[in-house]
Amino acid sequence: MAPWHECAQQKAPTLTNFHDFKLHEAIARALAEQKYLTPTPIQAQAIPAVMSGRDVIGIAQTGTGKTAAFALPILHRLAMMPRPAPQKNCRVLVLSPTRELSAQILQSFRACGRHLRLKSALAIGGVSMGGQVRALLGGVDILVATPGRLLDLVRANALRLHSVECLVLDEADRMLDMGFIHDIRAIVAKLPATRQTLMFSATMPRVITELATQMLRDPVKVAVAPPATTASRVDQRIVRADRATKLGALIDILRGEPIERALIFTRTKHGADKVARGLSRAGIAAQAIHGNKSQGQRERALGAFRKGESKTLVATDIAARGIDVEGVSHVINYDLPNVPETYVHRIGRTARAGAEGVAISLCDAEEAAYLRDIEKLIRMSIPMIDRRGGQRQSGLAPMHRGAARPPGTGSPQGRHDKPGKKGRARRPNGLSRSPAAAAERQQRWAAHSKGV
Ligand code: AMP
């Protein structure tokens, strides 16, 4: 049987219907059951490239359907070339930065591959190794892992990597941010040289380009948004608040906004707990997830958020990475991140799979420099609203856009600061609900993206 990397198909043009990919019948059936009809742009580009056996580097933010963009063609190739994985080995290895994201990736593989007879396993930290060692004993087709636990399993002689035919590095930029670079290099050094490698990243800093040059061979590059552009469907707003008034501002926002689910970000674990406690005291059900919580606590909090028992979830960046919850209507940055790319990751949590989302950031004077860096990265200025929603803060001096102006003396921000036009239905956050206004917003974001 031809090895994985030689079993290339004809290069297919970009396709717009799942039928056109000619995926294995069992996968097509699972897709229909999940009501996946039309490929997302990253899927339309990546699926033919991966099916052709080429290495792929994909630039896509979370929420663009990138998991299926690699899971579907990988499942197809496994279905077309069935063979048992040797003991303590895997045929496909997917590395992701967090436990939650790993679990979600595995879930996607299992959902799309439910009619195939494939063995899959998860190797993540925070739980005992025993179950994972047993799962790997007989060999698996697909292994989804966080880098640290994967290396622990290799060192414990529970896993060998010489049969890996395909490696996926998901959220590569975040793995680097989280300090996994040495682990990744150590893992890649143990893999066969003849393999297919797929790398996905939301942003493309130079270090990722370098890594791709070292680890991928003549990759096809697919991208759905230029690096570091903000998810185009997200309506972004800034609310100015002092450190002491931030909790009150957050409560006002949560009470004033039509919230389905709000994901609230804090910079620190301690901050996440404090905010969750403050919200609970104000009668708003809230749970916090962060690295100090046990896997069980994290899963319970996430479960309550998913089921809608708790409309708010307070999270640190690392804990929130990879959370895939449908219907996150609002992302609220209680603290602005000091790494501007993190802002792009955060707001990508809303507006997933075609939905419209709102991202509101509380910004105190000390965070003005962070805001400046974010606006530089996304190449747009984010409009300000006041903490109770309705009125924009026209006349309120933006903290970093020139000298303070007395109220009512005009806006240094141009059109974003202009009060809303009369007669339009406006959302509590100051955004018009009318289709014309929505289309105008879309155009504005699109223009921003093009300009980047
Ligand atoms: P991801 O970017 O992989 O995290 O995917 C974001 C969300 O979009 C997930 O909830 C997927 O189940 C969903 N999704 C992915 N591809 C499609 C598709 N072609 N049609 C509808 N939903 C999709």
Image: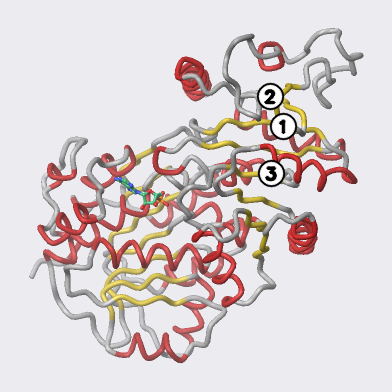
Q: Indicate whether 359 appears above or below 346.
A: above
Q: The disc labelled 3 sits on which kind of residue?
A: Leu
Q: Could one spot residue 451 in this view of the protein?
A: no
Q: Residue at x 67, y 34 (%)?
A: 374
Visible residue check, residue 284: yes
Kind of residue at disc 1 = Ile
Q: Residues within 10 Å of mark 3 (few under 14, many from 20)?
A: many
Q: CA distance from mark 3 to mark 2?
A: 19 Å
Q: Position of residue 125 (x, y in %)?
A: 54, 77
Q: Find the residue positioned furthest to the left.
A: 1
CB-based contact (under 8 Å), mark 3 and mark 2: no
Estimate the x, y position of residue 59 in percent, counting from the top left: 43, 42
- Dot 3 falls on a residue whose secondary structure is helix
Q: Secondary structure at mark 2?
A: loop
**The one of 423 and 53 positioned closer to us in this rendering:** 423
Q: Earlier in the sequence, mark 2 or mark 1?
A: 1
Which of pointers 3 and 2 indicates the residue nearer the eye? 3
Which residue is disc 3 drawn over?
Answer: 254
Tell me if the residue at label 3 has its CB under 8 Å from ligand 1. no
319 vs 402, left or right, is left
Q: Quadrant of residue 60?
A: top left
For residue 298, side relative to residue 76 (left or right): right
Mark 2, ligand 1, within 8 Å: the answer is no
Q: Which mark is residue 383?
A: 2
- The residue lying at 64 percent from left, 37 percent from top is 257
Q: Which mark is residue 238?
A: 1
* Residue at 67% over, 59% down: 285
User: From the viewer's perspective, is 52 left or right of 197?
Assistant: left
Label 2 to label 1: alpha-carbon separation: 6 Å
Q: Quadrant of residue 354?
A: top left
At horizontal 49% and vertical 75% (from top left) the residue drawn is 124
Marks 1 and 2: in contact by CB < 8 Å?
yes
